[in-house]
Image: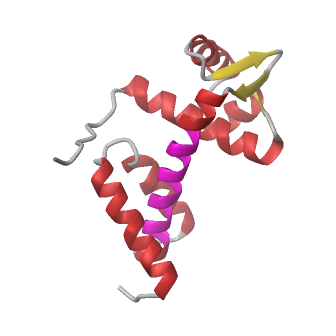
Amino acid sequence: MTKVRHVLPAKGRRREDYLKHIYAIQKSKGYARVKDLSRALNVSSASVIEFARKLESDGLIRYDGGVIVLTEKGKAMAEKIYERFLCLKDFFQVILGLPEREAIENACYLEHGLTEKAIERMCEMVNKYKEKKINY
């Protein structure tokens, strides 16, 4: 039976967005700062600090002096979210030929509401296209 992924409530989407952005920033810099995350998410530093404390209490990040680092648990979750996002972005950009900015916007919009099976199939299609350069 297909595992159905329902549209996440706002709190779940927010958590995924934070983890995805922390992961991306940490991947490039080794850590994320409050102001980096504030800029990436287009929210106030106070909002980042408030939510960082929630993520820390859930054991997903370590937050100290404005520096945010994913824990192993947080990193595992964030990697999955980030890979799903990249797959969707590639689907819109590579398969549908959308410009990068539009591909990103669509991936951000849909990443929280598609079933795991739909995302899996889209990823398979992207991978086949990249391997064989199939024209759709």
Residues in magenta, as a range = 78-93
92 drawn magenta: yes
Q: Please state if 110 lies on the left or on the right of 25 as rendered.
A: left
- Residue occupying the point 74% across, 25% down: 68
Q: Nearer the viewer, residue 24 or 102?
A: 24
Q: How many marks?
A: 0
Q: Please state if 67 lies on the left or on the right of 114 as rendered.
A: right
84 drawn magenta: yes
Query: Looking at the rendering, which quadrant does residue 47 occupy?
Result: top right
Please state, as top left, top right, bottom left or bottom right, where the C terminus lies in the image.
bottom left
* Residue 130 position within the rendered picture, expressed as x and y whole percent measured from the top left: 51, 79
- Residue occupying the point 33% across, 27% down: 9
* Residue 13 position within the rendered picture, expressed as x and y whole percent measured from the top left: 43, 32
- Residue occupying the point 72% across, 42% down: 25
Q: Nearer the viewer, residue 81 or 8?
A: 81
* Residue 79 position within the rendered picture, expressed as x and y whole percent measured from the top left: 58, 44
- Picture layout, residue 68 above or below residue 58: below
Query: Looking at the rendering, which quadrant does residue 48 occupy?
Result: top right
Query: Looking at the rendering, which quadrant does residue 95 occupy?
Result: bottom left
- Picture layout, residue 116 above or below residue 26: below
* Residue 109 position within the rendered picture, expressed as x and y whole percent measured from the top left: 40, 47
- Picture layout, residue 52 above or below residue 128: above
* Viewer can see residue 55: yes
Taking the view exactly as shown, the residue that stands out farthest to the left is: 1
- Residue occupying the point 48% across, 29% down: 14
Magenta stretch, overall SS: helix
